[in-house]
Amino acid sequence: MKLFSIFLVAAVAAFTFTAPIHADEAKPINDVCPVKGKDADGSKSVDYTATFCCDKCVAKFEKDPAKYAEKLASAEEGKCAFSGKDLDPEATATVKIAVCCGGCKKKVTADPLKYLGEVE
């Protein structure tokens, strides 16, 4: 019974400490709409999945996606934004691009790379 109690406490602690990490992952990478330049609170956003050549490049991007957004947007099609190598379809990272309104959401959904380059 004592072992079960220890396990239960450990499980509750694990869920308690991992919850904020998952919440941060869902946070948009910007707070200014890349279309109109207005404040964007994240209630409206577009998910964009970026593809890289390897997991090392994914990790680099995930550390600070806003910092590398323009680099990703200007990368040669079919090539990794960091290494220039061919893309690995399994090496991906998804980010949220916040927008200010439904009209901007449509524009960003239609061409996310264009507006990813405008993220501040």
Image (spheres, rainbow, N blue to C red):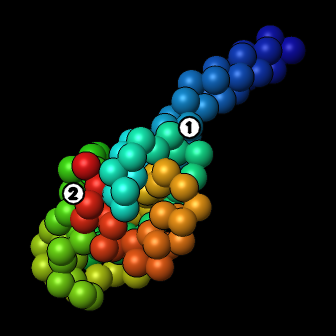
Is 53 located above or below residue 86 in the figure?
above
Is 66 located above or below residue 105 in the figure?
above
For the residues labelled 2 and 1, the Cα–Cα distance comes to 21 Å
Quadrant housing residue 31: top left
Q: Is residue 10 left or right of residue 29?
A: right
Q: Is residue 8 left or right of residue 33?
A: right
Residue depicted at x 20% and y 63%: 70
| Amino acid marked by disc 2 | Tyr
Q: Report the label total.
A: 2
Q: Is residue 74 left or right of residue 64?
A: left
Q: Is residue 109 visible?
A: yes
Is 70 located above or below residue 41 in the figure?
below
Q: Which residue is mark 1?
A: 23
State the quadrant of the N terminus: top right
Quadrant housing residue 19: top right
Q: Does dot 1 land on a helix, a strand or a loop?
A: helix
Residue ranking furthest to the top: 2
Q: Is residue 24 left or right of residue 50?
A: right
* Nearer-the-camera pick, 89 or 46: 46
Q: Which residue is mark 2?
A: 68
Place of residue 39 in the rendered image (x, y in percent of width and height, measured from the top left): 41, 41
Q: Does dot 2 land on a helix, a strand or a loop?
A: helix
Residue depicted at x 55% and y 40%: 22
* Nearer-the-camera pick, 37 or 61: 37
Quadrant housing residue 76: bottom left
